Amino acid sequence: MTTRFLPLLLALVLAGTAQAAPRPLQPLIDATPPGGTLTLEPGTYAGPAVIARPMTLDGGGGATLDGGGSGTVLSLEGTGVTVQNLRVVNSGRQQDLLDSGILVRGRYHVVKDNVFEDCLFGVNLQQADHSVVRRNRFDARDDHPAERGDAIRLWYSMDNLVQDNVAVGTRDLSVWYSNNNRIVGNRSTGARYGLRFMHAKHNLAERNVLERNMVGIFAIHSEGIQIRGNRIAHSGGSSGIGIGLKESDAITVAGNEVLANATGLYIDVSPNDPEAPNTIEGNRVAFNGVALRFHNDGEGNRIRGNDFLGNFGAVAVEGGGSALRHEWAGNHWDTYEGFDRDGNGVGDSPFEVYAHADRLWMDLPVAQFFRASPMLEMLDFMERLAPFGSPRLLMRDAAPAVRPVRGAS
């Protein structure tokens, strides 16, 4: 009796398996006329797929495109493709091939309101111009941070808008060899770099919220970057950096909140061109281990009108140099001990930072464990009370503001 029903049972199992198999997406794309809209029914569709003509792919909020764990899930080419309301999952894992959720090439594409899960790279713009990446969410794979890909990656891509995206636990949001892009209103947590510029020019990073990453924003070998109105907080670990500049010129860092990082602002051979100074103004740099750390005894930064509040150390200079050759003007330092007898809002005496014994923890990484310890506090007290030698002057703000520049904090 049992044997008689085995063929029927096997047929039912095979039928169920066939029904569960994802439907290939490519034939549906091929059947959509240029300029048309393909709205997917709820369910799972199989990638990889390529869109090479103007059209809209709408996931309707209930469709999933599954790459099957191999290669890039969806590629956009040519001009004028919009992909929206789609869940994109399960790309390949090949770092050298840049396996991605969506690969974008060409011009005037829009990728918006999508969710990316279990993708190595999320949206990868490769020589893509005048395109928009907006309101997408990126959730990282459960890999070591260095083995994850970038939520959004721009490579030789110009004049794009990256706006209001959310990335959780991804590696970076990176801009390589790409110019005139706007990175606005994005959120990143748990990443390596919240936002990184490499060999990039004239990009804007504005109103981004970058919290609990290893590094907030870092510009490397870049020029003319505008970093404005961002909130960078809790960059983790002993080397956590809020905003960093390395061999970068004509950078503007203005109106940002840089809060509770190991190092607030990090300057490394920047500017590289002495005729292209960087401007750091109107920022609130608060509750960091060190407010400003300079990698070398350089020059060429204009540091004006910032609020430095509640930082454990104001300025550190590695290698035994100083920060005297930068322009310091009108900053508010909450550790300033001078007076304002004429009431003009400017201190009567300069704000100066000297190298005392309490700076051991800044200059020697092995001593950071003892920061704020009774031993270092005692050494600092003795150094100030009866110094064995002249302390080294690190920086001087000749006209410090006696009240916060940006108002009450």
Image (cartoon, grey):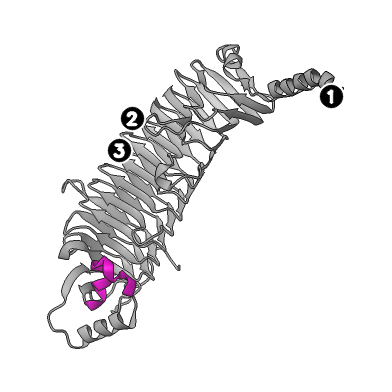
Disc 1 residue type (three-letter): Thr
Q: Position of residue 148 (x, y in %)?
A: 44, 41
Q: Which quadrant is the C terminus positioned in?
A: bottom left
Q: Secondary structure at mark 1?
A: helix
Q: CA distance from mark 2 to mark 1?
A: 65 Å
Inspect the magenta stretch and tell me whether residue 404 lies in it: no
Q: Local crowd at mark 3 within 10 Å, few (<14), some, or many (≥20)?
A: many
Question: Which stretch appears magenta?
Answer: 357-371
Disc 3 residue type (three-letter): Ala
Q: Local crowd at mark 1 within 10 Å, few (<14), some, or many (≥20)?
A: few
* Residue corresponding to mark 1: 2
Q: Nearer the viewer, mark 3 or mark 1?
A: 1
Q: CA distance from mark 3 to mark 2?
A: 9 Å
Q: Place residue 242 in its image quadrant.
A: bottom left
**102 or 32: which is nearer to us?**
102
Q: Secondary structure at mark 2?
A: loop
Disc 2 residue type (three-letter): Tyr
Q: Is residue 307 above or below residue 196?
A: below
* Residue corresponding to mark 3: 200
> Outermost residue, left direction?
389
What residue appears at the point 69 percent right and 21 percent down from the top-left corner?
Answer: 18
Q: Position of residue 144 (x, y in %)?
A: 44, 47
